[in-house]
Amino acid sequence: MTDMTPDTPISDDPTGDEIALLEEKFPGAITIEDRKGYEGIIIDRDKLVDVARTIRDDLGYDLLNSATCVDYIEDEAFEMVYHASSTERGGSPFTFRARTPRDVAALPSLIGVWRSADFQEREAYDLMGVHFSGHPNLKRILMWEGFHGHPLRKDWREPFYEQDTKPFDSRWPGGHVIRAEYTNPYGKNVQYPEGFTLEDYHGDIEESVYAGLATTDSGIGIQHLRTDELVVNLGPQHPSTHGVFRMAVTVDGETVTKLEPVMGYLHRNHEKIGERNTWLGNMPFTDRLDYLTSMINNVGYAMTVEEMLGEEVPFRAEVIRVLMSELTRVVSHFWLFGFFLNDLGAFLTPAVYVITERDLVLDFFEAAAGSRMMCNYMRFGGVAYDLPAYIGGPAIFDTDRARRIDTRRFLHDLVYERLPRVTDELDRYLTGNEILISRTKGVGVISAEQAINYGLTGPLLRAAGVPYDLRRADPYGIYDQLDFDVAVRYNSDLYDRYLIRLDEVRQSIRILEQILPMLDETEGQEYWAGKRPYNHRVPEGDNYARVENAKGELGFYVVSDGGQNPYRYHVRSSSFINLTALEEMSIGHKVADIVAILGAIDIVLGEVDR
Amino acid sequence: MYGVGIFKGLGVTIRHFVNTYVDDLKWGVKRYQTDEGFEARQSPDTTGIVTISYPEERMAVPERFRFVPFLVTNEPDDPEEPNASWCTSCGICAKVCPPQCIWIVRGEDPETGRPIPDPAEFYIDIDICMNCGYCAEFCPFDAIKMDHNYELSSYDRTTAHIHDKERLSKPISYWQKIAPTRAEEERLAREHKEAAKAIKKAMRKRKKSA
């Protein structure tokens, strides 16, 4: 049965001792960060790999959470910011940076230290144009090959560029409306390479995608048969890829020998939009990242900015945030059960069962926040509204059917009866199913060490036997006051990845059972402190804050220059980084299995592509 | 024994199937034709079919539901200023709007040329609107609210999706109808504010005379 480990001990914040150790070992290579509002160290780029290895091995920061690039255009420099944490000790991440001049932007790749740097460095190469020496597969990841320019650089302008930051001056006081599509999209804002002519352009033939997939003569296992390898595209328009995700795979018969994930079809330069937006204006955009867990996205972004503003969150708001987060986690995992089984061939019946339950939770979100999926419910310093008095609304139109269910009753029925009952029913329905077992046991295995090295977080990491859950490892909100266990499984196959979600749903229900009495106790208390301005000015500095999303660690890295808009806004998305290990998990399995492996990673393309 | 798990699972499916009939028999026609039946169908206790036969019946949306904003005006039969817009064209909604879909031309006095608290033009490009509700949330005059009418399809995408001041304006009674509790709360808050202002004014007057 489920094996629950005791709470992981929580270490202190990275101390001066650790930095002193690094300084001693690498004299002259370490500079302690002294800019206002920043923390961590700056590492000389020639020593980066060695220092990083020491940080991993000697200091014990074995998980690279986030690696992202900031364009300091006034300093003529790019800065890579790394956050690494320890899966054993927990606690807040260790921040280190490396700088490179802007004109010849090059840094050593950390892929030899942490494989999780793979996609993140490719992203920095793609969107910022920083070259990583030693990266074996350095090519664009979100934009297509042949795209000209680096769209996250500060001097980049998108085709409908109007102004660097919002609010735009054209909207008020003389706001004469004009549709964006009337402004010529092929005007001066579009950048072409020098000497580009349409006549010589032959479209994108995706050489880079297929370059690594060249077929070989050697078949796997069945050497006595003469077999040829074949390159097949799975997706992007295929239901098994959960959106527009594409896997270019080399198959030997039915067996996968190489796999190249291709993404970016849903890329909308979310981070650049975030830099144009005001601080508050980003909140509804975070809903559109992982649209199945918009409440948790809201919490993560609100926390990041609150920490910089020094804003206190009232207790009731914290209680409501946990209520929303855990309900979100339950429905997100339910969604996985439905569609994971769909991937395995149990066509839609499990999906319809779990969607029924999800809809009830969304009814509650709709009554509380005003929208079922795009909740936009959290604000800096609290939540937008108190809980509603009732679920349902007044009938307005002729055919409207009204209902009026007391919120307290609704939540009690849901948390104490319906959700536990449905979870048990799903357990009975699926867990013992022999087809499910034979399809999932022993498939997609990845070892605990590899899982950490690949930067896997969330249920994938915990199913590999690493009890790393941010709600315990680096507690935020009121999670340290709540009683729950970190679910962990050890076989790291698809079956365990399914089971761990079932465990987590049960733990979430356990948290919800503790939250409901707290809601009653705090009835009528303040839910949004502070002055509630619409134009926040955030003090200078940077901040990385993370929450445990249903899919893994969701982090937000923001840099403020003291103005009304973020200078840099980066989303550390778990769906994206968990995909790093997809090839490792898939090789040697059948084509039908990689569909299931992808399904069990649980990606949402809104968050992968951003 | 191999296959037990599958049969157990099929048992769950059959239970779901049977439950729909149990619930239907218990309620009879009432389940589909009365509001009580609807509430039972859409509550956490339900075990039967949960679907709604849209558009023959629609689920009434909650008061906080937000879809494309509208501008609040006085009633057509208002004794003092019929149909007057509550908007003062202060521009907060246009500044706070994350996708910048609100366009306002500030009203000006034709004689003096100074700004007056009434917008000359007001546009919302509903193709761009992301229904976040900030405009309504941060409006200090309760002059812009989120609508509940989500059926906005049209045959013409190029002009019908830019709502002008005339199309956006709806009387306050409409807001009271779609969100009775909130409208009442806001009315009380406004009265409270007015009263506080009046007291402050009176105090100042007394101070002056003293």
Image: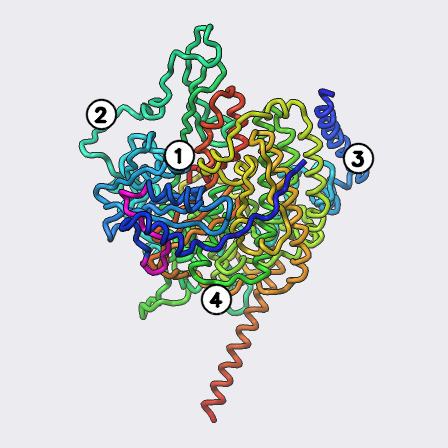
- Image point 72% across, 26% down: which residue? B10
Residue A341 part of the magenta segment: no
| Measured Cα–Cα span from mark 1 to mark 4 | 40 Å
Q: Chain of mark 1?
A: A
| Measured Cα–Cα span from mark 1 to mark 3 | 48 Å
Query: Mark 2, residues whose alpha carbon is within 10 Å: few (<14), some, or many (≥20)?
Result: few
In the picture of the structure, the residue carrying the numbered disc 2 is A199
| Measured Cα–Cα span from mark 2 to mark 3 | 69 Å
Q: Which residues are magenta?
A: A34-49
Would residue A362 be seen by someone viewing this image from the given angle? no
> Upstream in the sequence, badge 2 or badge 4?
2
Residue A470 in the image: state x and y as whole percent. Answer: 53, 47
Please identify, in this view, whether the residue under mark 1 or under mark 3 is nearer the observer: 1
Residue A39 part of the magenta segment: yes
- Image point 56% across, 48% down: which residue? A8
**What amino acid type should be assigned to the residue bearing mark 1?**
Gly
Residue A173 in the image: state x and y as whole percent. Answer: 35, 60
Q: Chain of mark 2?
A: A
| Measured Cα–Cα span from mark 3 to mark 4 | 53 Å
> Upstream in the sequence, badge 2 or badge 1?
2
In the picture of the structure, the residue carrying the numbered disc 3 is B22
| Measured Cα–Cα span from mark 2 to mark 4 | 59 Å
The residue sitting at the right extreme is B26
Kindly state the secondary structure of the residue where label 3 is placed. helix
The residue sitting at the front extreme is A24
Residue A531: numbered disc: 4
